Amino acid sequence: MSKIIEMIDDFRFNQEILGRKPKYIESCMYRLKMFKDFLETLEVFEVEDVKPIHVKKFIKERQNLGRENNRTINNTLSTMRVFFNYLVEEEFIGEFENPIRKIKNLKEDNKVIVTFNDDEVSRIINGIKEDTYSNIRDKLILIFLFDTGVRVSELCDIKQSEVSTRHILIHGKGSKQRLVYISRIMRKYMRLYEKARNERFKNKQPDEIEDYYFLDQSAMRLSRSRINTILRENCIRAKVRKDVRCSPHDCRHYFAQKQLRNGIDVYSLSRLLGHYDTQITSKYLRGMEQDDILYLGRVHSPLRDVHVKRNKTQK
């Protein structure tokens, strides 16, 4: 028999070997500990004794607590699937003994995503002066977020060596890597920023400058909280609608919906966003107006490039 707590430790060790990010591992451990603590209240301590009914009772308890919505509970179920699939692969339990094998996700609310419009994005970006290192850096950060759709954590982790002439290497979720393009407007402000950065830290030794692309005033990696603040402050100045949360993830929503309006297909968009499948990407369609959908349908009509000849009826 295998103790659940020991298997969780074993799972953590394996995730570290696979090179998973510390934040991802800690999130997994937090969710698995919740499940372990619940099982202990049922006096279940070995993985072989965990049954589907225990998983269902755990879901019900999370619902009864009222502190988590269905999406949050589904995220926990996702972690549990990874955990029990690992136990199956390592042959601690059999495939048909996997207690979560037939457990389905809860239905999530299809909320319409309200994000920035073009005028707001223009006011946010153009309202920043280009007179100091911080201002130039902040302007480029906002251009990055709106023009590439990268996650804020991905932006923070960009290193100097991962920036080339035409694209940037991004380290996404689950240790997945992808490339994002560098547009002309991005390249313009990247050159401006790199010049300002070199001037800002010209008196520092190389070992005093961290090898990240975006640096704070002390030549250290820029934090997520600082980027959140940069965006929020500029949203307030630009008088963005209250319906928009003004988080970096809203920049990602803007990017996705603008790409869709410009005619990109969902599969290509999923690649740019770093999604595992197109079902995740398709949620961005919900935030688009019906007129936008109809317009895309007309522009990309299957018969758009097909010559249809009219055959007149002869009398």
Image (spheres, rainbow, N blue to C red):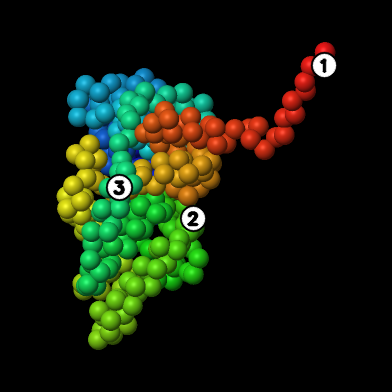
Badge 1 local density, few (<14 within 10 Å), some, or many (20+)? few
Q: CA distance from mark 1 to mark 2?
A: 59 Å
Nearest the eye: 116 or 165: 116
Does residue 261 appear to the left or right of 193 in the view shown? right
The label nearer to you, 3 versus 2, is 3
Q: CA distance from mark 3 to mark 2?
A: 30 Å
Identity, as a three-letter code, of the amino acid under mark 1: Gln
Q: Which residue is mark 3?
A: 119
Q: Are marks 1 and 2 in contact (CB under 8 Å)?
A: no
Q: Are marks 1 and 3 in contact (CB under 8 Å)?
A: no
Specify which label sits upstream in the sequence, 3 or 2.
3
Residue 309 picture location, percent across and down:
75, 29
| Residue drawn at x 25%, y 54% as measured from the top left | 124
Disc number for residue 314? 1
The label nearer to you, 1 versus 2, is 1
Specify which label sits upstream in the sequence, 1 or 2.
2
Disc number for residue 178? 2
| Residue drawn at x 28%, y 57% as measured from the top left | 125
Secondary structure type for disc 2:
strand
| Residue drawn at x 35%, y 61% as measured from the top left | 157
Identity, as a three-letter code, of the amino acid under mark 3: Asp
Q: CA distance from mark 1 to mark 3?
A: 55 Å
Secondary structure type for disc 3:
helix
- Marks counted in the figure total 3
Nearest the eye: 243 or 36: 243
